[in-house]
Image (cartoon, helix red, strand yellow):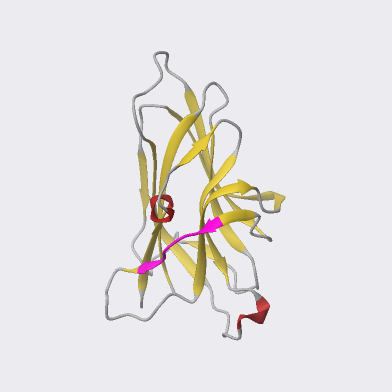
Amino acid sequence: MALYIINNNTAGSLQTIGTVKTITSVYSKAAASGITLSRAFLYEFEVGTVGTPNATDNAISWDIMRATTTGTASTGVVNPLDPADTAASHDGFVNHTAEGTTTGNSQLWQLSANQRASYRWVVNPGGPGELVVPATASNGAILRGLGTTYALTANATIYFRE
């Protein structure tokens, strides 16, 4: 089983959010890519803000949603945790400037937190509870942040297996 990591800092910058923004995402390849599609299993992710907090405490809402299009984003670097593993067969996108398409009941996880709090979610790779990216072209899982009170800089990391 190959394990991979993607972080929105791999594109050279972090994401500033004020309205809902996708920060880091994992997608099955597009249909024209010529590879056999497989599922990806998210087993760990971390979210937090970077820099000096605002003087007054503010709330941030984080979520993971299923998406059926990628929107507009930078291509992220998907790194294998073991350098002997092959390149990932999934695409990673970071720091979205236009949101992809989600459906109403596609939320997989949600957390409301304080700006000063970071959060880590983890299950055993291969164990129960992993979040699944379907083996459907251009479908994925997106990790989003929403901070309506002030513009914040967010960092998000996703670990997944294929």
Quadrant of residue 2 in the image? bottom left
- Image position of 16 with respect to 101: above or below: above
Quadrant of residue 19 in the image? top right
Percent position (x, y) of residue 131?
50, 60
- Region rendered in magenta: 74-79
Percent position (x, y) of residue 151?
51, 27
Which residue is rendered at x = 39% and y = 50% of the image? 9
Percent position (x, y) of residue 149?
54, 21
Quarter of the image that includes the C terminus: bottom left
Which residue is rendered at x = 52% and y = 68% of the image? 91
- Image position of 27 with respect to 147: above or below: below
Percent position (x, y) of residue 143?
52, 49
Which residue is rendered at x = 56% and y = 53% of the image? 142
In this view, the residue in front, 11 or 45, is 11
Magenta-colored stretch includes residue 110: no
- 146 lies left or right of 41: right
User: Residue reaching furthest front?
Assistant: 12
Magenta-colored stretch includes residue 78: yes
Quadrant of residue 78 in the image? bottom left
Tally the numbered discs. 0
- Image position of 50 with respect to 128: above or below: above
In this view, the residue in front, 63 or 127, is 63
Quarter of the image that includes the N terminus: bottom left
